[in-house]
């Protein structure tokens, strides 16, 4: 069964591996810091898909202003490990 849950700084190593699979050069410490920073905003949720304690992917939903709208909207990005 796949569980969807909020990301935590402890997930940094697994998320870093997913990002590296996509070609991003990131270190777990950088990822952990960013997870902490985004968690503090309250407007940038990141959710993980987990199965048997293995991170399968994540979805980031940052709140941002756009030229074409008057109010902030959410952008979405989904990354998966190919599992």
Image: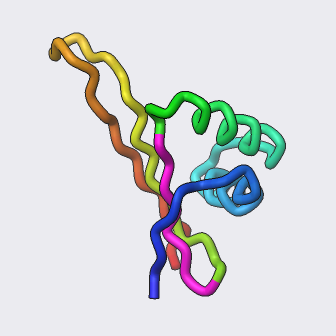
- Left or right position of 71 against 83: left
Q: Is residue 13 above or below residue 1?
A: above
Determine the residue positioned at 76% across, 57% down. Answer: 10
Where's residue 39, x and y in %? 59, 38
Residue 40: percent from left, percent from top? 61, 32
**Side of 53 relative to 67 (left or right):** right
Residue 17 image point, x, y percent: 70, 59
Residue at screen point 75% across, 36% down: 33
Q: Let me know if residue 51 is in the magenta part.
A: yes
Magenta span = 45-52
Q: Is residue 72 magenta?
A: no
Q: Residue at x 27, y 16 (%)?
A: 66
Residue sitting at x 65%, y 80%: 53
Q: To which quarter of the image does residue 68 belong? A: top left
> Compared with residue 25, is residue 50 higher up or lower down, i.e. above or below?
below
- Residue 24 higher or lower than 83, as above or below: above
């Amino acid at each position: 069964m796949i569980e969807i849950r909020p990301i935590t700084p402890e997930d940094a190593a697994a998320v870093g591996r997913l990002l590296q699979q996509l070609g991003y050069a990131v270190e777990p410490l950088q990822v952990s810091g960013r997870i902490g920073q985004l968690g503090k905003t309250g407007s940038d949720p990141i959710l993980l898909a987990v199965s048997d304690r293995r991170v399968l992917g994540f979805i980031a939903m940052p709140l941002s202003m756009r030229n074409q709208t008057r109010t902030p909207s959410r952008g979405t990005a989904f990354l998966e490990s190919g599992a």
